[in-house]
Structure formats: structure tokens, C-alpha cells
Amino acid sequence: MRRVLLGFKRCMVPVPWVLFTLIVRRGAKKTRRVLGGLDDDHRRVHHFVVRNLPSLARQMPPDFIANRLNMGEARVVQILDELERRLIFLFRPGGRDVVWAYPITAEPTPHKLAFSSGERLWAA
């Protein structure tokens, strides 16, 4: 018999296998709905921001992304607009520079991160 334990506060609660598979299927369906329709450029921009925000350690402007990915700045801005509108892992206060790309942020928070490569940043 399969057994799944779900952490809730300080307890581990057993969850019936049927309920667990239902939860996973619903989560997968939601993920497909949110991420569906993203093309390779969307993924390139998103992955670039997440990978490079720690080493940049400040807000990331669209022209920086465009130059590094050899894309037009207008296309990068369009992609950032769509990613932010669809609530996909990034935030740009003022609608320009990327400040937050889950799970990290260039703005101070109570959650400090230290990478093995030496970068120090905050968790979103």
C-alpha cells in the first residue's frame, strides 16, 4: 500500500493515495494553464533573470537582458510584461527593471541568502 505524509504545522498527516493523486493532477493542470503558451524566448528570458540576478545583485534592466541574450529590447520588454502579467515568477515595480525573480530578490528582505559562489542576496 502506498502511503503519503503531508507536513502540516509541526505534524505529519497521512493522506490517502487517491487524494494525493487528485491534488497532484490538479496542480499539474494549473501549471499547464499558467505556463502553457510560453515560447522559447519567454523561457530564455525567465531563466536568464533567475540565473543572473544573484551575480548582478541589483535591479536588472531590460536592456541588460536584451544585450546578453542578443534580443531586441522591445521584445524583452514585451516578454517581461507578459511574464509579470501572468504572475510567472518575477516582479518589476514601476514596470521596468526586474527586482524580484522567484526565489530571489535584489531588494532587502528578512530572508538572507549566501551562495557557495560567494554571492549574497535576499530570498523573495
Image (tube, rainbow, N blue to C red):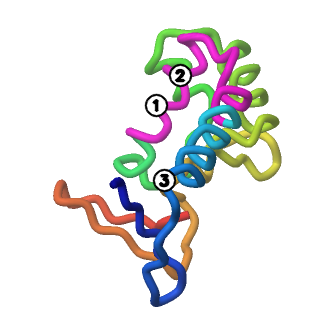
Which numbered marker is on residue 43?
Answer: 2
Q: CA distance from mark 2 to mark 1?
A: 6 Å
Q: Nearer the viewer, mark 3 or mark 1?
A: 3
- The relative height of residue 62 versus residue 71 in the rendered view (above or below) is below
Query: Label 1, on which residue?
Result: 47
Find the magenta span and give its range: 31-51
Q: Main secondary structure of the magenta part?
A: helix
Quadrant housing residue 42:
top right
- Whether residue 26 sits left or right of residue 8 in the image: it is right
| CB-based contact (under 8 Å), mark 3 and mark 1 | no
- The relative height of residue 9 versus residue 102 in the rendered view (above or below) is below
Quadrant housing residue 117:
bottom left
| CB-based contact (under 8 Å), mark 2 and mark 1 | yes
Kind of residue at disc 1? His
Q: Estimate how packed mark 1 is, as few (under 14), some (14 to 19) or many (20 or more) residues with alpha carbons within 10 Å.
A: few
Quadrant showing the C terminus: bottom right
Q: Secondary structure at mark 3?
A: helix
- Whether residue 74 sits left or right of residue 51 in the image: it is right
- The relative height of residue 57 versus residue 69 in the rendered view (above or below) is below
Sequence-wise first label, 3 or 2: 3
Q: Nearer the viewer, residue 2 or 115?
A: 2
Q: Is 42 within the magenta?
A: yes
Residue in the picture at 82% in, 48% down: 94
Q: Secondary structure at mark 1?
A: helix
Q: Is 1 within the magenta?
A: no
Q: Estimate how packed mark 2 is, as few (under 14), some (14 to 19) or many (20 or more) residues with alpha carbons within 10 Å.
A: some
Which numbered marker is on residue 17?
Answer: 3
